[in-house]
Amino acid sequence: MAKKSRTLFCCSSCGYEAQKWLGRCPGCGEWNTMVEFKTAPDRRHQVAPAGEVKAVTLDSVPAVDEERFPTGIGEFDRVLGGGVVSGSVVLLGGDPGIGKSTLLLQAAEGMSAGRKVFYASGEESLQQIKMRARRLKIENGFYTAAVTELGTLLETAAALGPAVLIVDSVQSIYRGDIDGVPGSVSQVREVTAELVRMAKERSMAVFLVGHVTKEGMMAGPRLLEHMVDCVLYLEGDRYHSFRILRGVKNRFGSTNEIGVFMMESEGMIEVTNPSHLFITRRREQSPGAVITASLEGTRPLLVEIQSLVAPTSYPSPRRTSTGIDLNRVALVLAVLEKHAGISFFNLDTFVNVVGGVRLFEPAADLALAVSLASSLKGRNVNGDTVVAGEVGLTGEIRPISRIRQRLTEAAKLGFKRFIMPSANREELKSDSGRFGELQPVGVDNIKEAMGIALLHGSKS
């Protein structure tokens, strides 16, 4: 933190300084020579007094399109909003070993075509970076250094003048004139502030790797996420190879986009058609397995929801969910019991979204309800069926957004039937034949949906 002004006492004879007033100077032994004075504050981080500010109307401000350049990774560019903006600061967080350094090292190779890229690591030696680059088959000569002191990092970057600076990680960099160990609140705040200032002054794109806490939040002060322009999280399960890059803040684009990757020995591999990978075994029907069409930003994603309902010998049945909020599962169970007459009394329920995907939007409610009922009744849902819709507390099936994009994705993968809210079915009257052999089926309430979804399935 910046030093504030302090009150000291100085001997007028020998210049001896003391924190408090003394009758006799310990330096020269003279009496009544201590004079009070105040030290000047450290102004290195203070903003210079601004000149006259003139307010203007918004329509008089000239529109300027931001300059973007690609990272060389299409899924990464999608989440960033179309590429990297010069002068932007991007914070990338994720669990240890999830692939943050691997992704940025691959992006460094792509961005180094035609521009200088500086990869500064505070956690790995140059030999370790070289070993990782060799494994990833990276050959382009971007600049790299192992550095942990902020002053040295800034001087090296200023002398090199790169278009892109990658710091791995911000918690490993420290300022020597600030109290606290690297990664402490004060260190992270001041280090980030200096890097943001340099990015804006030099129009340098800066990528910061950030650690996360046990709760999955970015380590350090919450102010850290407010200071940067873009906050990305790399999510995934260490027992699955899928990785999802999700934006939670982006001043230069939408936060609704996701990027899908697979972590392989040769690095992060882009998945351009994730729906196909998540449902490749859909023909092997079994009770409790239902395909739903979820929307992640502008990208429709077809995933499989699996449920297992089984009797319990314990006084209190278990409710377990992976990939869907457990509170949402409890809500759907209550609606099924109240409005569809399907009781889950003394039954354990386990819900899982295949592939480590997490579903947040309520459009997965109807598929979840069908999956639970299918497992309880032991009836398969037809493998050519996709189910999507929001379930209301009164049992009605509420419309969902962007139904045409969901139908197009389902038709592309060869599905024959799409169970959806009746309100969405009405929207498609003018789209007859647009989705090939895919047949949209509208339902009004949860009881009707159960009947239609399980009618054509076989008994297991």
Image: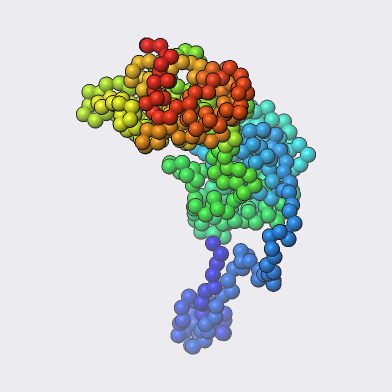
Q: Is residue 111 left or right of residue 259?
A: right
Apparent side of residue 38 relative to residue 343 in the rendered image (left or right): right
Q: Position of residue 205 (x, y in %)?
A: 68, 47
Q: Residue furthest right?
A: 114
Q: In terms of depth relative to the viewer, which is nearer, 112 or 245? A: 245
Whole-percent x and y of residue 295?
Answer: 54, 33
Q: Is residue 95 above or below residue 281?
A: below
Residue 106 vs residue 315, the one in the foreground: 315
Quarter containing the N terminus: bottom right
Q: Position of residue 233 (x, y in %)?
A: 54, 40
The one of 24 and 457 positioned closer to us in this rendering = 457
Q: What residue is at 40 percent from the left and 36 percent from the top?
A: 392
Can you say whether 308 is above or below 161 in the image?
above
Residue 262, can we see it? Answer: no
Q: Is residue 255 visible?
A: yes
Quarter residue 277 falls in: top right
Residue drawn at 46 percent across, 41 percent down: 216
Q: Quadrant of the C terminus?
A: top left
Query: In the image, residue 143 lies at what x, y percent?
Result: 71, 41
Of 287 and 406, the residue lying toward us: 406
In this view, the residue farthest toward the left is 315
Q: Quadrant of residue 403?
A: top right
Q: How is the image coloured?
A: rainbow
Q: Residue at x 63, y 44 (%)?
A: 253
Please give the name of the residue rendered at 25% of the width and 26% of the height, measured from the top-left corner: 346
- Furthest-bottom residue in view? 32
Q: How many marks?
A: 0
